[in-house]
Amino acid sequence: MRQRRTIESRLERSVQRAVARRRIFPYLAAATLVLALISGFVMTLVDHKNFPDFGIAVWWAIVTLATVGYGDVVPTTVSGRVVGSAVILLGVTFLAFLTATVTSLFVSSDREAEKEREQAEREAKDQELRELLHRLEQRLSSIEEKLRKS
């Protein structure tokens, strides 16, 4: 039980680091591949008639996870359809995560570019204000000098 918690906490920290570094795509791609392999293996067990070998089963799992659904291989047993339903739901979920990840990367890169542009504008305005302040100080000094002389 304790080792399970340790593994779960390591996995959770790893995922959090990946999300923070915007490197979640490889994790999702790997998880999709593992899910395809597991789904293919399970299908060879529960519906051997329609999935006589591992290659066909993995092909079906990849096509189903990608929500393409060619229909060249389909489960016909009840247990095969249950597994197929789970694979469909997981495939849609994973695709949603992948889409959200890519969208997030685009949005964050746009935000970073906008922040850099705003920073450059602020620095330019700050420089203008410094120059104006310097000119005003010089004029004030000149006025003070003239007042002292008179």
Image (cartoon, helix red, strand yellow):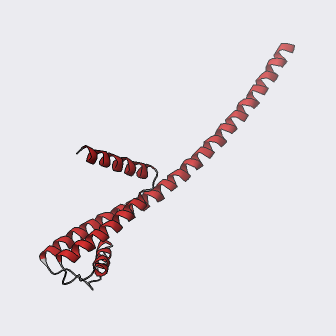
Is 113 drawn above or below residue 99 in the view shown?
above
Residue 84 appears in which quarter of the rendering? bottom left
Q: Position of residue 44 (x, y in %)?
A: 22, 77
Q: Position of residue 98 (x, y in %)?
A: 38, 63
Q: Nearer the viewer, residue 16 or 149?
A: 16
Answer left or right for 84 relative to 17: left
Q: Quadrant of the N terminus?
A: top left
Q: Nearer the viewer, residue 146 or 69?
A: 69
Can the viewer see residue 94 in this picture? Answer: yes
Q: Position of residue 59 (x, y in %)?
A: 32, 79
Question: Is the residue 30 above or below the residue 133 in the image?
Answer: below
The quadrant of the rendering that contains the C terminus is top right
Q: Quadrant of residue 28?
A: bottom left
Residue with the most extreme left position: 78
Q: Is residue 95 visible?
A: no
Question: Looking at the image, is 130 positioned above or below residue 5?
Answer: above
Q: Residue at x 12, y 76 (%)?
A: 78
Residue at point 74% right, 28% down?
A: 136
Q: Is residue 115 left or right of residue 52?
A: right
- Farthest residue toward the bottom? 72
Which residue is rendered at x = 29% and y = 63% of the image? Answer: 93
Residue lying at the far right in this picture: please name it. Answer: 149
How many marks are shown on the rendered structure?
0
**Residue 34 placement (x, y as % from top left):** 33, 66
The residue positioned 34% from the left and 50% from the top of the image is 11
